[in-house]
Image (cartoon, coloured by chain):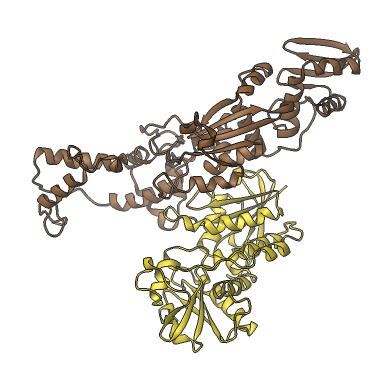
Chain colours: A yellow, B brown
């Protein structure tokens, strides 16, 4: 038997934090690629300490719903899952290319394939583009549009900015949008000045965040001037300084994220059959975030 | 019992030295087949006679079939002699099976008593859940789940669900629509029912309502619950939680008393300061154990760590005796989560809103200082 366990941060305060993790787990469960699909959280239950106990399978693929490699993926998750002999060198990564490592969970004796985070996977680029399609309602969006990928910045984790740059560059290479720009919340180029960085009238703004929360629902919309008070909501698109800002909300809520999770597990050796194709078909068109 | 179950029993008898399960002993000896229960003892049977005897003891056969062929044999449960099962090798499978057996009191009653009880439904409580086991045709168990407060409610008055994952929508918010960060808080909303679940779906639903309680309960039943006490938990923390090992034992005691008693959490606290040092706070009577401080407690402990760094100071306040008592009443009311219960015009309650507003108007200065006494002196 093989199981998929999606691990995520979760929240004591905000139920939206775990919602995308549940949604993507449901999508993957529905295509039947695994005998079991479970979720575990740092701040919710089952905890990372106990999630493996809820899994009956011997072989477990663990995929972190995190944006970048760093404190959580390198220290917290392996420690809490009790992955025997874990060392970050197992991933042999430069901060962007962790794929997977196979270890035994000492708590349950399960064979755990510990995968790199979803955020750094190359197919995440497709999810960002899909998010732009969802929010504009245009499957061919690109021409005449700018695209901004937004992240925290390096303050908390240098790899977080690497992931933003990586995807921004890949989207640029697609030659689909007129302009592509990486923006940050706590460093230059700042998301506050989004309109300074684009000539295109229409700009899609996609935060590279796993879930909607304080940053994506309150900070970023207010910083960009979509609204004075996040509680009153904002228009999609919203007029700011002569630009139309199509604010997409956290990319992690896009249904196609389930595909990234699956691909991570498949690359670690999970036998998922044609599930990747089926998930890609099923996850067309998530309703856009907004007011 | 159906014919396939009897065939399966005969296959099992052929493939092993005999079957021994829940009071049923069946096998083949030199003088022919034998079939024994607490009430029947037949030996030297031909296959046709064996089938006849089995057919007149259908409960024993269907019971054997349900537990060994549908639920799966546990590693440590009753066994078919020499027969190995590969269906439930992990703890998870054993835990599921042990929970389902708990649900029908399987360890306390023989098969006939159980079947009679199951005909009406056997109900047990798991936190705020009411688990009812019933038996359908051919010994197949069906399970029903609802809130303990709805134990006697008419099904038509409840929202009925079938998919275990739908339980997520029930457990996310409390009756007042507030997010529930702790799944084992005694704030599970009522008014719903899951009906006609098989064993796997029942366990999945319970695991959605109270995650990981079944495997931890199972480990405890097996005498190998691994408890991680406070000090070990605090030492393991890194990042922003690294500081919680500063808290002294008295503060840990207050944490357990604040967060872990039954009025706040239905898990039975098994962790203490460390293996040698028990905490006095009530552990609770819950059926499932708490094996280590949870993330909510760790996060709260971080706040208390920084607050406890402050030294006490002496302040001078002017309060009438009734006002002092009112302050105490307000703290009590908030601590017990009773503020919502206090009626709008019930000015006899110290924590009544008008009473609190009057006290504030009288005793706070323009900067919100009690009795005009500044916080930093
Ligand atoms: S530590 Fe355990 S008993 Fe205390 S609140 Fe958390 S889960 Fe409940």
Report the number of discs. 0
Taking B271 as reference, is B54 above or below it?
A: above
Considering the image in quadrants, where does the N terminus of chain B appear? top right
Q: Position of residue B293 (x, y in %)?
A: 44, 43
**Seen in the image, is A221 located left or right of residue B33?**
left
Taking B47 as reference, is B372 above or below it?
A: below
Q: Quadrant of ligand 1?
A: top left
Taking A226 as reference, is B275 above or below it?
A: above
Residue B124 or B310: which is nearer the viewer? B124
Q: Position of residue B199 (x, y in %)?
A: 65, 35
Residue B235 or A227: which is nearer the viewer? A227
Q: Quadrant of residue B59?
A: top right
Answer yes or no: is residue A146 visible: yes
Answer yes or no: is residue B314 visible: no
Q: Quadrant of residue B17?
A: top right
Q: Position of residue A276 (x, y in %)?
A: 71, 63
Considering the image in quadrants, where does the C terminus of chain B appear? bottom left
* Residue at the extreme bottom of the image, as rendered: A199
Residue A107 or A271: which is nearer the viewer? A271
* Residue at the extreme front of the image, as rendered: B156
Q: Position of residue A67 (x, y in %)?
A: 54, 66
Q: Residue at x 54, y 75 (%)?
A: A164
Q: Quadrant of residue A107?
A: top right
């Amino acid at each position: 038997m093989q199981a998929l366990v999606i691990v995520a941060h979760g929240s004591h305060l905000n139920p939206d934090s775990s919602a995308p993790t549940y949604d993507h787990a449901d999508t993957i469960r529905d295509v039947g690629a695994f005998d079991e699909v479970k979720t575990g959280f740092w701040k919710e239950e089952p905890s990372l300490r106990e999630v493996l106990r809820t899994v009956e399978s011997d072989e477990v693929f663990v995929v972190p719903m995190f944006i970048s490699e760093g404190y959580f993926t390198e220290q917290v998750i392996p420690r809490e899952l009790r992955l025997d002999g874990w060392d970050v060198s197992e991933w042999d990564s430069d901060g962007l290319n962790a794929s997977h490592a196979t270890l035994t969970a000492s708590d349950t004796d399960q064979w755990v394939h510990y995968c790199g985070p979803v955020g750094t996977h190359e197919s995440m680029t497709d999810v960002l583009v899909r998010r732009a399609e969802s929010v504009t309602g245009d499957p061919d969006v690109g021409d005449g549009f700018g695209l901004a990928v937004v992240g925290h910045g390096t303050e908390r984790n240098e790899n977080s900015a690497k992931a933003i740059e990586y995807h921004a560059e890949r989207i640029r290479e697609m030659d689909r949008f007129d302009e592509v720009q990486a923006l940050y919340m706590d460093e230059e180029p700042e998301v506050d000045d989004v309109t300074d960085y684009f000539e295109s009238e229409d700009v899609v703004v996609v935060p590279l965040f796993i879930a909607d929360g304080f940053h994506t629902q309150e900070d970023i919309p207010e910083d960009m001037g979509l609204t004075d008070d996040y509680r009153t909501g904002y228009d999609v698109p919203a007029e700011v300084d002569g630009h139309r800002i199509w604010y997409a909300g956290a990319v992690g809520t896009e249904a196609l994220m389930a595909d990234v999770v699956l691909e991570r597990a498949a690359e670690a050796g999970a036998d998922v059959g044609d599930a990747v194709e089926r998930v890609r078909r099923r996850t067309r068109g998530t309703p856009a975030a907004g007011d | 019992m159906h014919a396939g179950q009897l065939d399966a029993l005969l296959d099992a008898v052929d493939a092993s030295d005999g079957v021994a399960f829940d009071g049923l002993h069946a096998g083949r000896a030199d003088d022919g087949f034998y079939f024994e229960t607490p009430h029947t003892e037949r030996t030297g049977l031909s296959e046709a006679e064996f089938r006849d005897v089995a057919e007149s003891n259908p409960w024993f056969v269907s019971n054997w079939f349900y537990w060994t062929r549908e639920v799966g044999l546990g590693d440590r449960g009753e066994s078919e002699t020499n027969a190995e099962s590969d269906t439930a090798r992990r703890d998870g499978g054993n835990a599921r099976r042990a929970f389902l057996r708990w649900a029908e009191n399987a360890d306390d009653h023989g098969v006939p008593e159980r079947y009679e009880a199951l005909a009406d439904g056997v109900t047990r409580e798991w936190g705020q859940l009411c688990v009812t086991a019933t038996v359908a045709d051919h010994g197949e168990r069906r399970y029903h789940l609802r809130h303990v407060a709805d134990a006697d409610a008419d099904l038509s008055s409840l929202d009925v669900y079938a998919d275990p994952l739908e339980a997520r929508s029930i457990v996310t918010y409390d009756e007042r629509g507030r997010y529930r960060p702790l799944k084992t808080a005694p704030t599970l909303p009522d008014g719903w029912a899951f009906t006609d679940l098989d064993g796997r779906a029942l366990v999945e639903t319970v695991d959605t309502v109270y995650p990981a309680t079944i495997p931890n309960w199972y480990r405890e039943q097996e005498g190998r619950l691994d408890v991680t006490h406070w000090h070990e938990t605090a030492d393991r923390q890194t990042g922003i939680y690294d500081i919680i090992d500063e808290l002294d034992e008295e503060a840990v005691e207050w944490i357990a008393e604040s967060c872990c008693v039954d009025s706040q959490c239905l898990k039975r606290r098994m962790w203490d300061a460390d293996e040698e040092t028990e905490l006095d706070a009530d552990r609770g009577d819950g059926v499932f154990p708490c094996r280590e401080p949870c993330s909510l407690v760790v996060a709260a402990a971080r706040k208390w760590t920084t607050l406890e760094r402050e030294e006490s100071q002496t302040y001078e306040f002017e309060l009438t005796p009734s006002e002092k008592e009112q302050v105490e009443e307000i703290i009590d009311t908030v601590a017990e989560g009773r503020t919502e219960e206090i009626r709008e015009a019930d000015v006899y309650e110290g924590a009544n809103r008008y009473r609190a507003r009057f006290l504030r108007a009288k005793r706070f200065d323009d900067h919100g200082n009690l009795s005009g006494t500044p916080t930093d002196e």
